[in-house]
Image: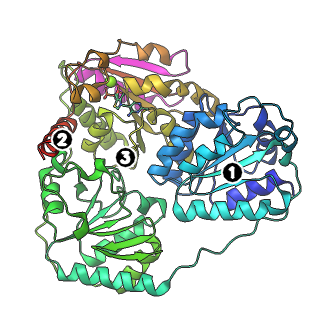
Amino acid sequence: MRLAEALLQALRRAGAREIFGIPGDFALPLFDAIERSGELPLYTLSHEPAVGFAADAATRFHGGIGVAAITYGAGAFNLVNPIAGAYAERTPVVVLSGAPSRSERSSGLLVHHQARSLDSQLNVYREITCDQAVLDDPAGAAGEIARVLRTCRERSQPVYIEIPRDMVTADIGPVPVLPPSPVDVDAVEAAAVEILERLRAASSPVLMVDAEIRRYGIEEAVAGLAQRLGIPVVTTFMGRGLLAESANPPLGTYIGVAGQPEITELVESSDALLLLGVILSDTNFSISLRQIDLRQTIIAAERQVRLGFHVYPDVPLADLVIAMAAKARPLGISPDLPDPPPPPYDLPADDASVSPNDIATAINDMMRSHGSLPMASDMGDCLFTAMDIDQQALAAPGYYAGMGFGVPAGLGVQVATGERPLILVGDGAFAMTGWELGNCRRYGWDPIVIVFNNASWEMLRAFQPDAGYNDLDDWPFHELAGPLGGLGIRVRTRRELAEALELAVATRDRFVLIDVVMERGSMSDTLSRFVQGFGRRRAAAESG
Ligand SMILES: Cc1ncc(C[n+]2csc(CCOP(=O)(O)OP(=O)(O)O)c2C)c(N)n1
Ligand SMILES: [Mg+2]
């Protein structure tokens, strides 16, 4: 079989559902093979960062693996940032890069798109992917593809595959289906028993969940385990949206001082905090009201279980959850569960100017009337505002925090779910990747996009109030929508916002951009508390 076809078939078998990409001359043979084989649908976008964000977000929603196909050098270096984000936030995305042919490599000339050496690109990607393969040898290619795809799934992180352009049509053997990497079943059992004992001995155990439970497709299993144990569940900031559709959605989201005090108290006073698939990041934990001693918590993530100083290596999260479920009995606690305030509803339709909190309220009202939409959010106050939106499936860079994610991520969500997504994005982030909306018409995508237009890098202003460099110009984003194939509406008041959302819901054949003009300095309550919490932590750290 030809290498490209074998690779595409192996990708599909491993869980790929689509390819996002931008071609270049080194990748043309590969793109030809993608289009001709029809193995996986190909969606081309306008700038490689968007390719990576869309592939990442689609993967978060469909739970398989993502594929980002790009050309050598200029294309691949443009893709570095989203792949770094996917690495940090544990999304399994396969980077397929075209590359110079074997004869071009040995010609002695510098090759266009080359940075320092021909392997500079590979070396950069070694840092941000968990396995790499350069398919320059027909004899070894099938085995390399199989290994790299297995690592991608098992580690749930990006991998890198480089395909010299003359190798696309090389004959290679069938790509084997590798068995899962060996797991020490006894270690899994022992870890499950020890965790359950710790929980049983505790008086206020709490389960906190994060990205990995979705990446490994065990959300339902975790929900079932929590219910069997009778243990309260919360998500991290990064994990907002997990289990949103479960029969027993989480009590809320832990954001330390920035979150609901009831949830903060529940988590920080727990004497057995079990973190399943949790990323131990500063956005998740550094704004605790009371310092959580992570050595006293139970952490199962990154194929490891840690209880204090006791570590079980090589314990896949899914195996652990299955082993725990098999042994789980009710813990027999009847915790005094908090009753966090419900999300805000019923926006007054008046002429008051719009605040970020109003946007959350208006979205809650819209979804209550018309059904929920899967969401993607950028970094910025829009993500903090999303914490007040009644729990919905959400793709957002809650840890890596890279701007530019929102719009292309929303396009990925539409591809993965076939549903119309809701995209939340700041004006600064929209200026980075918002143009990608111009690709909606070609593919029949119709997201609803809410631009938080405060003419400002407001989140930065919140940390550095006197800085002039955070001022942005007032760009009429709504006027850009028409020429890009969408409908644009600018709103300034709460009445206009509610009406625009109704119109957006009723407009089904194109994207709708609602440009929400807000005052500089107007911030969501969650972001204000987050900034204050960070300030206090910094001051405490500096005073020793
Ligand atoms: C790619 C990238 N560049 C810079 C930053 C630093 N940064 C964090 S928030 C922010 C401002 C975001 O502005 P906007 O999208 O308008 O949202 P707002 O803060 O106004 O809600 C910046 C520049 C970042 N997170 N990512
Ligand atoms: Mg802004």
Q: Choose top left, top right, bottom left or bottom right for residue 312.
A: bottom left
Q: Position of residue 257 (x, y in %)?
A: 15, 47
Where residue 461 appears, as percent x and y from the top left, is 25, 25
Is residue 508 part of the magenta span, yes or no?
Answer: yes
**Residue wearing tag 3:** 399
Disc 2 to disc 1, C-alpha distance: 42 Å
> Gap in Å between the C-alphas at discs 1 and 3?
26 Å
Crowd class of label 3 (few under 14; some 14 to 19; many from 20; radius 10 Å): some
Assess mark 1: CB under 8 A from ligand 1? no
Q: Residue at x 37, y 46 (%)?
A: 399
Q: Is residue 438 left or right of residue 300?
A: right
The residue carrying pointer 1 sits among few (fewer than 14), some (14 to 19) or many (20 or more) residues within 10 Å by Cα, namely: many
Is residue 226 located in the magenta-colored stretch of the structure? no
Q: Are marks 2 and 3 in contact (CB under 8 Å)?
A: no
Q: Amino acid at mark 2?
A: Arg
Residue highlighted by disc 1: 161
Q: Which mark is residue 538?
A: 2
| Res 462 → quadrant | top left
Crowd class of label 2 (few under 14; some 14 to 19; many from 20; radius 10 Å): few
Residue 287 vertical placement versus 377 (above, below): below
Task: Please tell me whether mark 2 or mark 3 is closer to you in this view.
Answer: 2
Q: Which mark is residue 71?
A: none
Check mark 3 vs ligand 1: CB closer than 8 Å? yes or no: no
Residue 265 in percent (x, y) is at: 12, 58
Which region shows up in magenta?
Answer: 482-510
Name the element at disc 3: loop
**Identity of the residue drawn at 59% across and 29% down:** 47
